Amino acid sequence: MKITQACLYLVEFPLKEPFIISYASYPVMPAIILKLETNTGLTGYGEAVPDEHVTGEQVHGSFEILKHVLLPRILNKNPFDIEQIHHLMDASIARNPAAKAAIDIACFDLMGKAANQPVYNLIGGRAHKNLQYPKVLSIEAADIMAEKALAAKNSGFSSLKLKVGLGDPAMDIARVYAVRKAVGEAMPIRIDVNQGWKTVSQAVRTINELEDANLSWVEQPIRMGDIRGLAEIRRKTATPIMADESVHSMEDVLEIIRLEAADFINIKLMKSGGIYPAVQMAKAAENAGLAAQIGSMVESSIGSAAGYHAVMARRNIGSAELTGPLLFQEEIGDLRFEPPFVHLSEKPGLGVTVDESQLDKLAIKTAVLDGSG
């Protein structure tokens, strides 16, 4: 089997309401959908959701890098040669993990379809009975977040993730305690600062003031890259710390382990370059006694399903937050959510059926590369 054609679609998914986090507000979610075709008649889908604030990529730039740099290197390759494909991509251009993830995910979709197995059976098998996800609340006024949190609890969600880190930390404290009061003491709550607290001392003070909120963990309180700062925060607070934007590569995982900088790491396919490197990072974390989660850059059913397959196959990935399809007004896939569970199909590959008419409708730019040329 070899890859004979690649089709690129730059799309904008309309959101039901703006997605607001500490460093940006998104009225729509831009993404790149990749379709790979083979000489055996199989089709595989991948997705890239670049984030200039985290991965250093921009969606139009990633489209051109896929078109002119990465895809020409992997046409006519066998998708089962995934390690070689990653070496080829890394030799072609440094970083650009979201663009590389699109190729990686599409290759795994093809591998699963060729083997007549769901992707998780190719990377470790079923390690979990079921998969759950939290209700994710973007940053709003404390009373609005509390109201939405209670509605989420009443609709069947068993845990919450609150986005914070925009403006005065005192406002974040008010948001968290308002939500805690609304949902009661038993419901697990995690918060994601998205680098929003500017200094180690500010983060330490704020986390200590939130100790009575009984948080499951605090995610990425300070700027990415400051792993030493994360380690200092962890030493000076009692609430568990999760590293997210500071975790892009195996080197980052090893540094976090060495400095004992976090209790959890948030691995995202868009930061790591896809399923293959994400699983390797999860294995390294497990060997060091670290738990992991697979997080989201707000992907469609394609990227979200890929992340959930990685979760399903790894025992130490105990949490997942891939909820992009729930935020979209219009979708292209059929990943099934039933709060608080997501149901992976046991169909071969990703198990996602892509509506190509909807894909064409949402596309604002397309390109086709043929391996025979």
Image (spheres, rainbow, N blue to C red):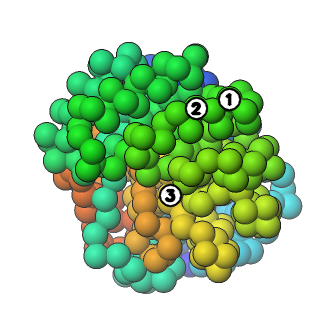
Q: Is residue 179 left or right of residue 247?
A: left
Mark 2 and mark 1 residues within 8 Å of each other at the beta carbon: yes
Q: Nearer the viewer, mark 2 or mark 3?
A: 2
Crowding at dot 2, Cα within 10 Å, few <14 / some 14-19 / many 20+, comes out as some
Q: Is residue 111 left or right of residue 340?
A: right
Q: Is residue 65 above or below residue 351?
A: above
Real-space Cα separation, disc 3 to disc 1, in angstroms: 27 Å
Mark 3 and mark 1 residues within 8 Å of each other at the beta carbon: no
x and y, in percent, of residue 92 in the image:
84, 56
Q: At label 2, which amino acid type do we have?
A: Thr
Q: Please name the residue that numbered disc 2 is placed on.
A: 206
> What residue is drawn where x is 14% and y is 41%?
155
Whether residue 334 appears in this view of the structure is no
Q: Is residue 33 above or below residue 120?
A: above
Q: Please name the residue that numbered disc 3 is placed on.
A: 294
Q: Nearer the viewer, mark 3 or mark 1?
A: 1
Q: At label 1, which amino acid type do we have?
A: Gln
Q: Earlier in the sequence, mark 3 or mark 1?
A: 1
Q: Is residue 163 above or below residue 38?
A: above
Mark 2 and mark 3 residues within 8 Å of each other at the beta carbon: no
Query: In the image, which disc is placed on residue 297?
Result: none
